[in-house]
Image (cartoon, helix red, strand yellow):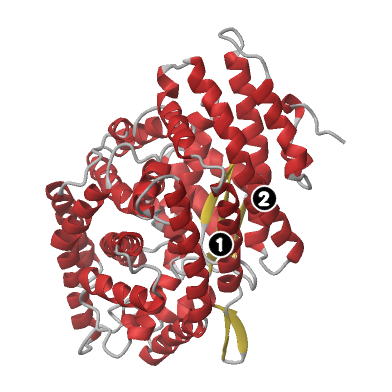
Amino acid sequence: MPLSPITTLTPAALAEATWDDIRPLYQELVDRPMDATTIERWLTDWSRLEEVVTEAAALAMIAYTCDTADPAKEAAHLRFSAEILPRMEELEVELARRLLASGYTRPDLEVAIARFRTAAELFREENVPLNTEIEEHCARYQKMTGGLTVIWDGVEKTLPELQPFLQSTDRTVRERAFRETCAKYAGCRDELAGVFDTLFDLRVQTARNAGFADYESYAFRAKCRFDYTPADCRRFHEAVEAVVVPAVERIMARRRARLGVATVRPWDTAPDPEGREPIRPFREARELIDTSRQIVGRVAPAFGAEFQAMMDEQLLDLDVRKGKAPGGYCETLEYRGRPFIFMNAVGVLDDVSTLLHEAGHAFHAFESHAQPWIWQRHPGLEMCELASMSMELLATPYLGKESGGFFSAEELARARVEHLEDVLVTLSHVASVDAFQSWIYTSGAGRDRDARDQAWLQVRSRFERGIDWSGLDRERITRWYRQLHIFLYPFYYIEYGIAQIGALQVWRNSLRDQAGAVERYRQALVQGNTRSLPELYRAAGVEFTFDARVIGELVAQVEAELEKWLRVSGRR
């Protein structure tokens, strides 16, 4: 039976749909007569179709990541990700070409039109089956890593459930949790490396088919990075090496002195340096949700209302359980204009930051949904991550219990120190992941699994200093196998670094005028994809930059703020 017309179609109607069911809907738009008087109606129908199909695909993905052990959910996810979405690309390009040929434009659609032009230029029919294969192997990676468990004191636990033990005051417990986590990844290293070998081959072939010498060049074009280049990313790496890595070394030196150890080993980076028990901000996911609702409502009442809507509509899955995919994400359900947040909360401090981070994405989805067409809502990931990282920082004045938050005065000082230190550590990590991915796809040796592992060790030695990894090369190597972005979303990571520099500027503005900084932040979110990245950053009151001088100024401000909170916490 044919599906309903586009104007009445719903995601639920596509739950069991195949490409044969969906293709006629796109073909009708390809064939429909169109002129200057009807083009906006045509765009509206195309946008609605994209909303319905992408939400149906998102729901299938969400169901699968919530339960990777269910064969039916895996099959449904693969039907969309490996069969329907790759085949949609060809007809989407035909529609884009019709729009480009029409000459239609308007100021708030110019960025989207530039993306359409890029997609049309890059599309190759022979890449459609390659993208299908890529999605299948990405799902395989998620299934493998989502099913990893250990037996801990006689109880089976997922790897995320070991995180609290990494914060233990008992060094032997921390080391055991660290080694068991690494051992699980090391034990399936060859299989994971085989998955990556296949993904590498498929991606390199995709780039060659589109006429590119290497996958990095292709990825930059495919990601529509109109405002910066690989050379700018290398400038970022150099700036981080020059001004961030030394700051992280100072953090680790301070940690070594406070812990009273000869060297900081990798299992010494998470516990409280004063030997205090780890902060446990909440006991159950419901408490995390309820308290976070209070915090974001203090940032802006509109954010509190939006978060409440997610609670009411059951759009949060935060509990950890066997078979659930690792990591966290915020997925937008385009048809209904709602976000969905997924994470694995185990009761540690990092869970609070993670939820606030994903909430920033969620508010971006809410605010930008005011734009009429789907392509006007989603800017580059550099702006999406600005939304999330800024929320982590804008929420900090309200984290204390006196403001309805999680922490006592002593815990708040500890939490602020940990977060600010993590900002700097994260910048170093981002630089290492981005530099590693660049090496993989441009060095000529990225297909060699042993060379990859050695390259990772070299990159980490450049950006991760102050930690003693002697005798732990195997464990250090497993870190990149746990970085799902490298497997699933190649070259999606520099965005975190760019956005963190922007978010620190939003935070700097908030120290002078919290209400004004929040308002500018909201005004940037609502613009969605209707402006370039530099323009969106300016709307948020910040600069889109890779400049070492600016980064150095922000690092100095973070370190000054760190000193203040260290004194409050009694560590100075």
Answer yes or no: is residue 292 visible: yes
From where the camera sits, is residue 396 visible?
A: no
Percent from the top left, x then y, of residue 249? 18, 72
* Kind of residue indicated by mark 2: Glu
Nearer-the-camera pick, 109 or 318: 109
| Front in this rendered view, residue 359 or 63 | 63
Can you give x and y, in whole percent of width and height, for residue 10 in the image?
Answer: 74, 35
Residue type, mark 1 in image: Cys
Mark 2 and mark 1: span between their CA atoms? 14 Å
Dot 1: few (<14), some (14–19), or many (≥20) neighbours within 10 Å?
A: many
**Is residue 65 depicted above or below 120 in this figure?**
below
Find residue 465 and report its horizontal and vertical position in percent.
21, 74
Question: In which quadrant of the rendered view does residue 22 lie?
Answer: top right
Identified at 33% across, 84% down, the residue is: 473
Decide: is 141 above or below 209.
below
| Residue under the image location 59 percent in, 22 percent down | 43
The residue beneath circle 2 is 83
Q: Residue at x 22, y 40 (%)?
A: 512
Q: Which mark is residue 70?
A: none
* Image quarter hosting the C terminus: bottom left
Q: Tag count in the figure?
A: 2
Farthest residue, direction right: 1
Please, what secondary structure does the residue beneath circle 1 have?
A: helix
First reached walking from the N terminus: tag 2 or tag 1: 2
Name the disc covering residue 138, or none.
1
Q: Is residue 118 left or right of residue 148?
A: left
- For the residue labelled by badge 2, is the local secondary structure a helix, a strand or a loop? helix
Looking at the rendered image, the quarter that the N terminus falls into is top right
Horizontal relation, residue 518 to residue 116: left or right: left
Name the residue nearer the viewer: 265 or 471.
471
Residue 447 lies left or right of residue 460; in this view the side is: right
